[in-house]
Image: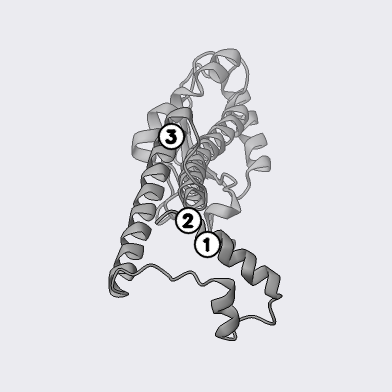
Amino acid sequence: MGKEEQIEEREVLDSIFPDEITDIDEKSYRIAIKPEIPLDDRNEDAEPPTFVLTITCPSFYPDEPPLLDLSLAPNAPKPPHIDISSDRPHLLSSLTTTISENIGMAMVYTIVITLQENIESLIRERIAVVQRAKDKEAEEAEAKENAKFHGEKVTRESFLRWREKFREEMDMREEEERVRREAEMKGKGGKKEEKLTGRELWERGMVGKVEEEEVELEEAVAGLKVA
């Protein structure tokens, strides 16, 4: 492509990027690129970051690739999830295939669109990484909280441990009850509760009228007891 063809491409670029393109000299110019940043990662009213692609066309362009450089616009806000100083080499090298496929043809427009897409893709990838980390942290926190409301998972070993502990507790309770009863007996002088005969119950008025033959039968049975 000769000089006239380069001028023609530049006129087309002026019509496509009327507010974004700025001349440096006859062979060089800048094009401002404003990638679309997800609204969740910046204020809706905030100005999106602006990248600047500097393009220098050699004499034999487009049979030779253009020289490219990438920077942030002066006073532009720092883009989220991207560092232009460390990410510049990667972003520029991501254009290698596009340039190779378009050697011999006007390619600046294609380069600009591809670069914008690559910037947006890189930002989305990093947002996804941050979100996955947040999701994982939230899941771990939820699992930890839920664990407070659930008992230990029952296994054969854990059941045997529980059964052994339960038996020990029951034995301990039985022993405490036995000691308590013995203490009560001692407090009563060690006397066992007196069992009254039918006549004694009747004489003390603790029962209703007892038939005479029942009283006599009970006394007869008591008389058979071996002393």
Disc 3 target residue: 158
* Disc 1 residue type (three-letter): Ala
Q: Nearer the viewer, mark 1 or mark 3?
A: 1
Question: From what the image shows, is residue 81 above or below residue 56?
Answer: below
Label ID, residue 225:
2
Disc 1 target residue: 222
The answer to whether the residues at label 1 and label 2 have Cβ atoms under 8 Å apart is: yes
Along the line of sight, the residue nearer the viewer: 32 or 85: 85
* Disc 2 residue type (three-letter): Lys
Residue 112 x/y as whole percent: 57, 33
Label 1 vs 3, first from the N-terminus = 3
**Mark 2 surroundings: few (<14), some (14-19) or many (≥20) residues within 10 A:** few
* Disc 3 residue type (three-letter): Ser
Question: From what the image shows, is residue 198 above or below residue 115?
Answer: below
Between the residue at mark 1 and the residue at mark 2, the CA separation in whole angstroms equals 6 Å
Q: Quadrant of the C terminus?
A: bottom left
Residue 114 x/y as whole percent: 59, 30
Between the residue at mark 1 and the residue at mark 3, the CA separation in whole angstroms equals 57 Å
The answer to whether the residues at label 2 and label 3 have Cβ atoms under 8 Å apart is: no
